[in-house]
Image (cartoon, grey):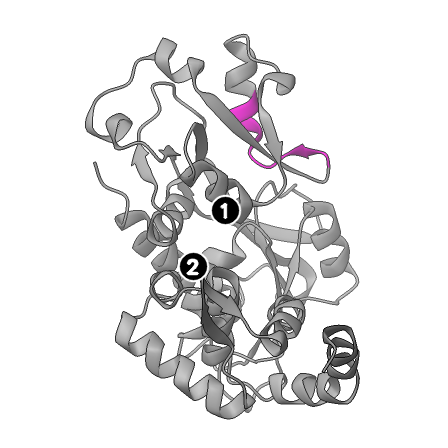
Amino acid sequence: MNEDIRAEKLTGEEGVALERKLSEVDINLLVALDGLLSYRNVTYAARRVGLSQPAMSRVLAKLRDFLGDDLLVRASTGMRLTMRAEYLAQLVPLAMSQARGIIGTEGAPDGRITISANLMPVLLPHLARSSNLAGQRLRISTHRLPADAVAQLRSRIVDVILGSVMQSAEDIDYETVCDEDFVTLTASEEHWLADIGPDAFLSMSHINLIDAGGEMFPQIAAMFAAQGLNRTDLLELPDIASAASMAAQGQLALTVPRSMAGWLTRTHRLFAFPPPFSFPNHEIHIAWRADDHDRERPPLVKAITTATRRAIAQDQAAVRW
């Protein structure tokens, strides 16, 4: 059958069937499926999700059986996605961001949280494995700009915000969940094995992560600017996964919070080392509507804070030198 005709048919009747099946996928399987479709490699996907390679192979077999497709097949260049898997790759990010799977237990009303897009790869696998979140199921969405998250909170679209750079306001309470230092990732093990000086560090080609036109981590850009490097001297990229893939190919350095470095070094051949400059720590905040709880921290906020601290600590522990 002609590929164009086949693809058209897939996005029709078969596409609807796949969407229906995807909506029935358990959240743990959805997290694993996202890893498999993103990395097209069982070993890398297993590291990303925190499973062993044999366990991920069993999950792949279960997904193949449930979805009725091989998903990953061998090709001359390695593993490739089947046509159905390519179609699923367009659907899964939306399913993840809208939390088609609901985390937690039935009974109480759903807890609604929006998580910064930068934190989703670190937190979602851990939240998916949480057995109890203050007795509530958790419906997750994502945001890129803090202002968008605050607007959702004030409009009662969500109950909790998890992210960074929260602003104080009378109607919103927030607290710092944790803060963490920055580490630099490169494909070269030489930087990992030996101390690197300021001049050598600045002579490297650096990636500057941007989001909605601004720096994802402003303290990094500010440090480079203080050392005479402008934004035009840096390679600007809006996507962390793409930035990590480019850094893993060599010649580029990527500086990120330690927990982020933890999962990136599990999924890419990257080595972490401490940068020779000090950066203000990256802070993660949680916020909620003050008028809903008489200024008391609600149980859901406590549960999410505990789960987040545990997740961040686990990924931070993966970075050692």
Q: Residues within 10 Å of mark 2 (few under 14, many from 20)?
A: many
In the rendered view of the protein, which quadrant contains the N terminus?
bottom right
In the rendered view of the protein, which quadrant contains the C terminus?
top left
SS class, disc 1 = strand
Q: Please state the horizontal and vertical placement of residue 206, each as a whole percent of the image.
A: 49, 25
Q: Nearer the viewer, residue 171 or 85?
A: 85
Q: Which mark is residue 284?
A: 1
Which of the 4 image quarters holds residue 159? bottom right
- Residue at the spot 72% in from the left edge and 40% down from the top edge: 212
* Magenta residue span: 213-221
Task: Give the residue type at disc 2.
Answer: Thr
> Considering only vertical position in the picture, is 148 above or below 57?
above
Q: Please state the horizontal and vertical placement of residue 131, each as a whole percent of the image.
A: 39, 80
Which of the 4 image quarters holds residue 56? bottom left
Distance, label 1 to label 2, CA atoms, is: 9 Å
Task: Give the residue type at disc 1.
Answer: Ile
- In the image, taking residue 38 as reference, residue 277 lies left or right, namely left
- Residue at the spot 43% in from the left edge and 19% down from the top edge: 204
Q: Please state the horizontal and vertical placement of residue 224, each as a whole percent of the image.
A: 52, 17
Q: Answer with mark 1 or mark 2, whichever residue precedes in sequence.
A: 1
Q: Please state the horizontal and vertical placement of residue 108, each as a whole percent of the image.
A: 57, 86
**Total number of numbered discs in the rendering:** 2
Which of the 4 image quarters holds residue 4? bottom right
**Does 215 lie within the magenta span?**
yes
On the question of residue 304 being in view, the answer is no
- Residue at the spot 47% in from the left edge and 44% down from the top edge: 245
Q: Which mark is residue 254?
A: none
Q: Is the Cβ of the residue at disc 1 closer than 8 Å to that at disc 2?
A: yes
- Residue at the spot 54% in from the left edge and 45% down from the top edge: 242
Q: Which mark is residue 308?
A: 2
